[in-house]
Image: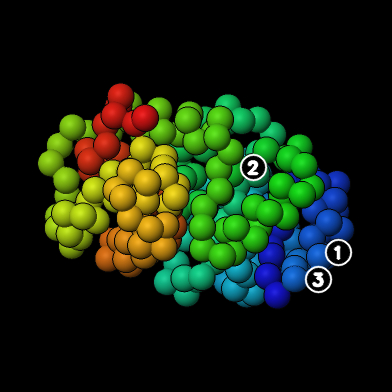
Amino acid sequence: MIRILLADDQNLIRAGFRALLDAEPDMTVVDECGTGHDAVRLALRHHPDVILMDIRMPGGDGLEAARQILSNAALPGTRIIILTTFELDEYIAEAVRAGASGFLVKDTEPAELLRAVRVVYDGDALLSPSVTRRIMAQLATHSRAAAPPATLERITEREREVLRLVGEGLNNAEIAARLFITPLTAKTHVSRIMTKLMVRDRVQLVVLAYESGLVRPGWAG
């Protein structure tokens, strides 16, 4: 059962999400709230698997709440999907940096919302293509053209190559085709890299690839 916490200051939004999620046989909404402070408090009480977090809320916004939750050692398995009204929200890149595993606009189709919850629960990351492009552009613009940090010394040359391709936005099948390996081998490499670099998911790998200078503007594609 996927345990979900809803954090949104609009009662109607929360009611709609709760009805949709609770109707699924593998999901349950453990609680809901309308402020960032309450989101942190309830996360520590319930230890949810997934939090649907509005990025703009009173009483501590969703970005600060996400930072507190995702940096708390008591909540290692909690993942956050950021919700907002507009795809052009200027805080999305910061939410990804903070460790959010996904991003959805609030008018997302119900089937897409359910898929997003399952994808993130399974340990993957989810961002709509248009949002991913914006985030990667921001990361590319602000990344430093510096030598990779010491953390990259933990991975092999082959794993660096895989990380670079992850940073370019390739999925496991595309990485496999590029490197002439099987998709399962590509998936294994990605999993090992996440373990060695101590990141939660694929989104964090992309951020690390850009911020380390392993991938830079104009390299993708």
Does residue 198 appear left or right of residue 113 in this picture? left
Q: Quadrant of the C terminus?
A: top left
Q: Residue at x 41, y 40 (%)?
A: 169
User: Which residue in the protein does label 2 denote?
Assistant: 104
User: Dot 1 surroundings within 10 Å: few (below 14), some, or many (20 or more)?
Assistant: few
User: What amino acid is labelled 3 in the image?
Assistant: Pro
Q: Residue 7: give x, y in percent of width and height.
A: 69, 54
Marks 1 and 2, how far apart at CA: 20 Å
In terms of image quadrants, where is residue 151?
bottom left
Residue 29 in sight from this viewpoint: yes
User: Which residue in the protein does label 1 denote?
Assistant: 23
Q: Residue 88: give x, y in percent of width and height.
A: 58, 27
Most foreground residue, 6 or 219? 219
User: What amino acid is labelled 1 in the image?
Assistant: Ala
Residue 131 position (above or below residue 1): above
Most foreground residue, 129 or 61? 129
Is there CB contact under 8 Å for labels 3 and 1? Answer: no
Q: Check disc 2 and report its element: helix, strand or loop.
A: strand
Q: Residue 112: give x, y in percent of width and height.
A: 71, 47
